[in-house]
Image (cartoon, rainbow, N blue to C red):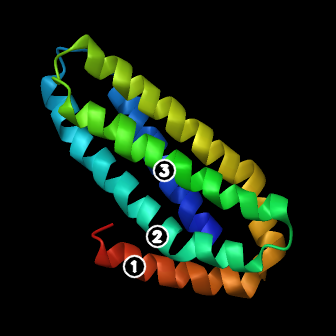
């Protein structure tokens, strides 16, 4: 699996988990309690392999300022989703209306971020990095993911 396929697979997994979470009500305490650590773990592992391996490779291959600007934006989106929304979600009462609202905001942020990567960054990465490099990056990312428990 190349780097982009691996990242897209991660995106789909997180989207699915967030959709499940968003569909829950305040009465679904057990389901919410089961989904929340899975979502947290998947997001943490995914952002780690992107930030440690994929983004630096993309940045090194970038030829234009517009291509280079994709990385700081993506990093800020990771920070906003992880540090702000996910932290707030984890701190929320699982039975509260605030929990449901925060889960929805996290899902929207992830959808936006993954959508931008898939429409803008990934096609550019295919062009800049090429098939062989993406394959090697995918192997490195899969190994790192495994070490992180993903």
Q: Residue at x 55, y 62 (%)?
A: 7
Residue 42's disc number = none
Q: Give the side of residue 66 with respect to residue 18, left or right.
A: right
Residue to which mark 2 is pinned: 49
Which of the pair 13/39 is nearer the observer?
39
Which of the pair 51/123 is nearer the observer?
51
- Residue 21 location, x and y as percent? 33, 30
Q: Earlier in the sequence, mark 1 or mark 3?
A: 3
Task: State the separation of the CA atoms marked 2 and 3.
Answer: 12 Å
Q: Residue at x 15, y 23 (%)?
A: 93
- Residue 22 location, x and y as percent? 38, 24
Q: Nearer the viewer, mark 1 or mark 3?
A: 3
Q: Give the side of residue 111 with respect to residue 61, left or right.
A: left
Picture quadrant of residue 44: bottom left
Secondary structure found at label 3: helix
CA neighbours of label 2 inside 10 A, class few (<14), some (14 to 19), many (20+): many
Residue 144's disc number = 1
| Quarter placement of the N terminus | bottom right
Question: Mark 2 touching mark 1, by CB under 8 A?
Answer: yes
Residue to which mark 3 is pinned: 78
Q: Is residue 10 above or below residue 55?
A: above
């Amino acid at each position: 699996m190349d780097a982009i396929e691996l990242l897209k697979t991660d995106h789909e997994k997180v989207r699915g988990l967030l959709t499940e979470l968003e569909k829950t009500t305040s009465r679904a305490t057990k389901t919410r309690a089961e989904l929340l650590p899975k979502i947290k773990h998947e997001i943490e592992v995914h952002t780690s392999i992107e930030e440690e391996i994929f983004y630096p490779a993309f940045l090194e291959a970038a030829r234009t300022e517009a291509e280079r600007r994709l990385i700081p934006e993506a990093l800020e989106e990771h920070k906003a989703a992880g540090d702000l929304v996910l932290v707030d979600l984890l701190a929320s009462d699982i039975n509260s209306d605030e929990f449901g609202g925060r889960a929805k905001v996290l899902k929207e942020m992830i959808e936006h971020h993954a959508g931008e990567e898939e429409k803008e960054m990934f096609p550019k990465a295919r062009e800049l990095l090429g098939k062989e490099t993406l394959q090697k990056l995918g192997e490195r990312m899969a190994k790192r993911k495994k070490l992180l428990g993903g």
